[in-house]
Amino acid sequence: MVNSAYIHIPFCQKICHYCDFVKFFYDEQLADDYLEALQKEMAHTLKDEKQTMKTIYIGGGTPTALTPKQLEKLMKIIHTYFHVDQCAEFTIEANPGAFSIEKMRVLKHYGVNRISLGVQVFDNDMLKQLGRLHQVDDVYQTINDLKREDFHNVSLDLIYALPHQTVEQFQNTLDEAFTFGLPHYSTYSLQIEPKTVFYNMHRKGQLHRPTHEAEAEMFEVLRSNMKQHGYHHYEISNFAKKGYESQHNLTYWSNDYYYGFGAGAHGYLPGKRLINFRPVPTYIKEVNETSKAVLKVEDITKKEEIEEELFLGLRKQTGISKATFEHKFNYPIQEVYGKELQYLHAKGWIYEDEDTIRMTENGLLFGNEVFAEFLLDEDVIL
């Protein structure tokens, strides 16, 4: 059963130097055309049956780069195909500064109840280095406006291990972030992705990142600060007050099914992954001509499903349920991963009890090494 939907809005006023998501400079006419195509894609996929979703997530790009009128059109499209009033969590991504009260009121009127705010760092020089348009003062203004407009479920995104960033500077960013008392923080280390400004700088030796030791220290500072302020570490990069965990992202980490709409969006349905056309003009053209947005359908083998169950599930603090694993795949987890679990336990990277396998605090520092142990050999018969 599909309980979640992701909707991609690719438009930005400026392209950040680290971003590899599908994005396109905002153009009003192109955005209008994109929304028309998005409606056609959703109509083709969902037919005439209005769906009930547990979560809806609008990501980007910068969805709030749309005008208030375009945002209202997007909301009406979503209401056409989903029972929004029955949706537990309806999230939209936004950036500080370019998020007007008028736009907030449109979103509030149409049932959006969670805002994911891309702040990244509380340092104007670093924001400029990242290619961000906003400054620190804009964050204060936007969060104050959101509170006045009765948005209380606000998540703040931060990035650490930035070029030239010190542990002390990251501590300063955390100190400032905590002054807002928000219920949720997502905090990621900087990843250098192909086809980005930072990637090109990195290849030329012009990107001066902190050492691995400094990055690890920042992660330790992050965890200790979050614990001190009463946030529980429910996923590798995510911290929340009880009851404010991201329900949509838990869909991904629980390896559950979801729709993906828009340019470059991925959907995950029983036995298959759907990947949409990525370039915005191509997406619009294909949908207008065929009503279909899907570029590629990948069949997912049982082996891949099992691997993903482990990769994703171990990101959560609650980890993997042995009973759930056996129910899903008809094999006890020990039968599939006995030697690997013994090795990881000996390293002190996982904790295991009667029904649960999860990463230890030390294991979180070696996540990639832990995940690599769960890659199955090609000749494994399941």
Image (cartoon, rainbow, N blue to C red):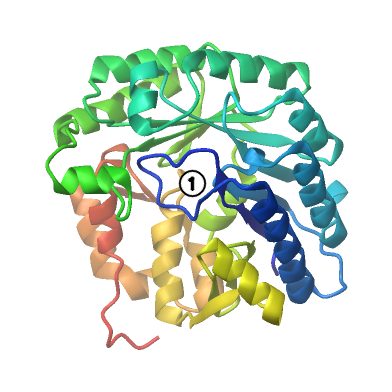
Residue 176 image offset from top left, x and y in percent: 45, 12
Q: Quadrant of the C terminus?
A: bottom left
Q: Is residue 106 above or below residue 21?
A: above
> Within 10 Å of the Cα at label 1, are there few (<14), some (14-19), or many (20+) other Cα atoms?
some
Q: Residue at x 76, y 43 (%)?
A: 71
Residue 43 image offset from top left, x and y in percent: 79, 71
Residue 119 image offset from top left, x and y in percent: 49, 27
Q: Which residue lies most toward the left here?
A: 205
To which quarter of the image does residue 94 belong? top right
Q: Is 46 left or right of 192, judged from the image as shown?
A: right
Q: Is 289 left or right of 360, judged from the image as shown?
A: right
Q: Residue at x 51, y 66 (%)?
A: 278
Nearer to us in this view, 102 or 156: 102
Residue 117 can be seen in this image: yes
Q: How many callouts does the rendering have?
A: 1
Nearer to us in this view, 354 or 301: 301
Badge 1 marks a residue whose secondary structure is loop
Q: Is 29 left or right of 210, judged from the image as shown?
A: right
Which residue carries the number 1 mark?
318
Q: Is residue 21 above or below residue 205?
A: below
Residue 212 image offset from top left, x and y in percent: 16, 36
Q: Amino acid at mark 1?
A: Thr
To which quarter of the image does residue 34 belong? bottom right
Residue 354 can be seen in this image: no
Nearer to us in this view, 202 or 265: 202
Q: Residue at x 52, y 64 (%)?
A: 323
Q: Quadrant of the N terminus?
A: bottom right
Q: Is residue 59 above or below residue 37?
A: above
Q: Is 101 left or right of 216, judged from the image as shown?
A: right
To which quarter of the image does residue 45 belong? bottom right
Q: Residue at x 63, y 43 (%)?
A: 63
